[in-house]
Each structure stands twice: as C-alpha cells, then as structure tokens.
C-alpha cells in the first residue's frame, strides 16, 4: 500500500474496510469512529466507485478480482441478488482475462512469475472457484467456473497460516484469556472446502444446466456425488472434524465451523433431490447400492418432466445486518449449547 504495488488498490482497501465495519459495529469505540463514515457505508460506496472507474479505464489486476469478490459477498448479504451475481461474474471473467485459471508453474519462464506470484494466483483461482459454487447454490443457478487439467492445483506452498495461533475477536466483552490459543489450520480448512466445492459443482451442473438435465444423468450424478461426499468425510483430518458426540470444550475457529455447515448444506441439497425422486417411487439408496452391499442396482426410467427442487437458502431480510459471530465454550450454562451449535 505504501508504494502502491501490484497487489494493492484503493478499491480493495475500501472493500476490506467495508467488510470489517460490518462485523465490529457492536464495539462502542469502533461504532463511534464509524459514525463519520456512515457506519462504514462510505467504504462500500467508495469501493464500488473506484471499481467502476478501473473497469471503465481497463485498469485491472489481481486486486480488482479480490475487490469484486468482496463486493459481491456484501451485496449478497444485503439481499441484492442481481448485483451480487453481476459483480461475481465480472470477477470470474477477469480471472480468465488475466490467465489466473491456468497453472502458472507451467509458464514460469515464459512470463517470469515468481513463486509468490504463483502462490497468489493459485489462491485467488480457488477462492473464485469456491465462491462460484456457493453463490450458484444460494441463487439456484449453474456455476460458471469449471476445473480442467490446466487449472492451478490445490497446493499451497506457504503454510505459515496453518499453525498461526487463533483467538476470537468479540464485541461482547469476553476476555482473550478466557479462550485458549489454538492453531488456526487456515490452509487445511481452505483446501478441504475447495475439495468439497468440487463435489458440489457436479451436482449444480447436473441440476441447473438445461442441456444436461436428463433424468438418467441426474440419478447417476446423485449416486456418484453421494459416494464422493462419503469419501470426503472419511478423509477429512481429525482437527477439522466436529463430532456432535465429542465436542471440544471451546468452540474451534470459525472457518472450521463454517466447513461443517457447508457440508450440511450440501447434504441437504442432495437430500432434496433424492426426496423428489423418491416421490416417484424410486429409492436411490436401494437402486444404486450406496451402502456398498454389492447388490446390483436395478434399471429405472423417469418422465422427462421430473421436477427439480431449488436448493436455496432462506432469503434474508435485506434491511438486517448479520451480528458478529460470538464464540463460546461448550460447557454447562453456555448461551449456545453443543447440540444447537453443531447439529448432526
């Protein structure tokens, strides 16, 4: 930022400040300072203004894509679906325009990429890939980014964030000493959520792509992706697991909790599809031997007008703002008990 380098932009800084303002308004000291900036709204407006100027003038780069993702997420949180979809779409187009969707290791000598450049490009590609699946799932639309053999691998060379000590930031007055420091496992969490999004992508493409919406293909997709999800859960490292029957004394880092809820949302989406098919008299588990019993599956047929359920999350109130995530221990008397915080 000091030298206005390649990885800095005013739009990105303003987008980060806008996001930060949303999550710290309950802190009296911060809230007082934010009044001069319309409670953080000025940061968001400035980010959009600078983004529009940059796009009009063709001044684009990696910070532009990062800022667009943040603006898209904030618009989505406000209930502005069209704007969220539009900003994310521009980010995905720029991803291809900048060549970030291609593994930079294969062209290091041709374009003079440093190891740092490749690391940043890899992380940005998978960030876009993940957000593409989440917003597509939320809005009930077909994803835009598809993985191929030339795309960057799920490989993070810089694992320094994996073992950084993490502690919650709370506006409720909870003392830091009340929460023991714990490894963040940020890199592992990011890699495994990307793996999960690859499984989710196959379902979204099958359901929302009208060119592939064939009944037999839907059956095969549900069968294959339910098995893939089971394999994902089996391979998940222990430090990323949240078992309802063996919860830790203190809440783990928020991104680890988010990983579990994303998996639950995906399972719910698959269940919705299976419920629709079961209404037609076809039991997926029985027909496809998902339990691994070795019993051959039977043949089936479906009418072409088979309904497809929308895998949409509840529509939030655009006028409401999300409250800061409150962290707590899982001991007796806590405001959030283990069952409500981490359901099966």
Image (spheres, rainbow, N blue to C red):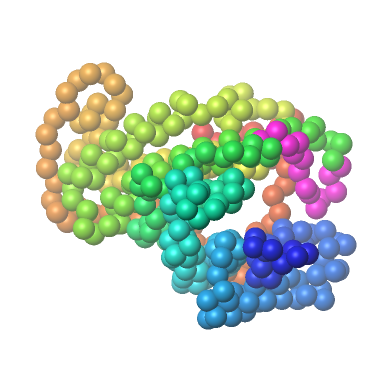
Q: Main secondary structure of the magenta part?
A: loop
Residue 70 x/y as whole percent: 59, 62
Residue 126 seen:
no
What is the quadrant of residue 42 in the picture? bottom right
Q: Front-most of 92 and 332?
A: 92
Residue 318 x/y as whole percent: 57, 69
Q: Is residue 229 above or below residue 204?
A: above
Please say whether residue 10 is one of the residues in the magenta stretch: no
173 left or right of 308 in image: right
Residue 331 x/y as whole percent: 74, 30
Q: Is residue 322 above or below residue 160?
A: below
**Residue placed at 86% from the left, 68% from the top?**
32
Residue 177 x/y as whole percent: 87, 36
**Residue placed at 61% from the left, 63% from the top?**
63
176 left or right of 315 in image: right
Range shown magenta: 162-175
**Residue placed at 59% from the left, 45% from the top?**
115
Q: Front-most of 304 and 54?
A: 54
**Residue placed at 20% from the left, 38% from the top?**
282
85 left or right of 322 in image: left
């Amino acid at each position: 930022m000091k030298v206005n380098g390649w990885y800095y932009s005013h739009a990105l800084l303003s987008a980060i400040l806008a996001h930060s303002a949303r999550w710290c308004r309950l802190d009296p000291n911060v809230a007082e300072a934010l009044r001069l900036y319309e409670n953080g709204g000025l940061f968001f407006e400035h980010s959009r203004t600078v983004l529009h100027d940059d796009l009009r003038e063709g001044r684009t780069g990696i910070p532009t894509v990062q800022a667009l993702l943040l603006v898209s997420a904030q618009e989505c949180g406000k209930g502005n679906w069209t704007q969220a979809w539009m900003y994310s779409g521009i980010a995905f187009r720029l991803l291809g325009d900048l060549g970030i969707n291609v593994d930079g290791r294969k062209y290091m000598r041709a374009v003079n990429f440093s190891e740092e450049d490749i690391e940043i490009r890899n992380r940005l590609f998978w960030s876009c890939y993940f957000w593409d699946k989440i917003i597509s799932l939320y809005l009930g639309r077909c994803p835009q980014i598809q993985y191929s053999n030339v795309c960057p691998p799920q490989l993070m060379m810089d694992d320094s964030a994996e073992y950084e000590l993490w502690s919650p930031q709370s506006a409720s007055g909870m003392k830091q000493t009340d929460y023991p420091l714990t490894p963040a496992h940020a890199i592992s969490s990011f890699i495994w959520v990307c793996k999960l999004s690859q499984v989710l992508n196959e379902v979204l493409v099958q359901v929302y792509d009208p060119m592939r919406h064939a009944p037999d293909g839907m059956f095969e997709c549900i069968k294959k992706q339910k098995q893939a999800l089971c394999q994902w859960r089996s391979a998940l490292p222990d430090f990323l697991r949240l078992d309802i029957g063996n919860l830790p004394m203190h809440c783990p880092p928020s991104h680890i909790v988010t990983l579990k809820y994303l998996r639950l949302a995906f399972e719910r989406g698959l269940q919705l599809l299976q419920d629709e098919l079961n209404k037609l008299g076809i039991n997926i588990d029985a027909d496809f031997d998902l339990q691994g019993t070795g019993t051959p599956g039977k043949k089936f047929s479906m009418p072409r007008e088979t309904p497809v359920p929308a895998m949409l999350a509840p529509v939030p109130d655009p006028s409401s703002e999300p409250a800061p995530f409150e962290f707590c221990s899982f001991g007796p008397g806590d405001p959030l008990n283990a069952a409500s915080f981490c359901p099966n």
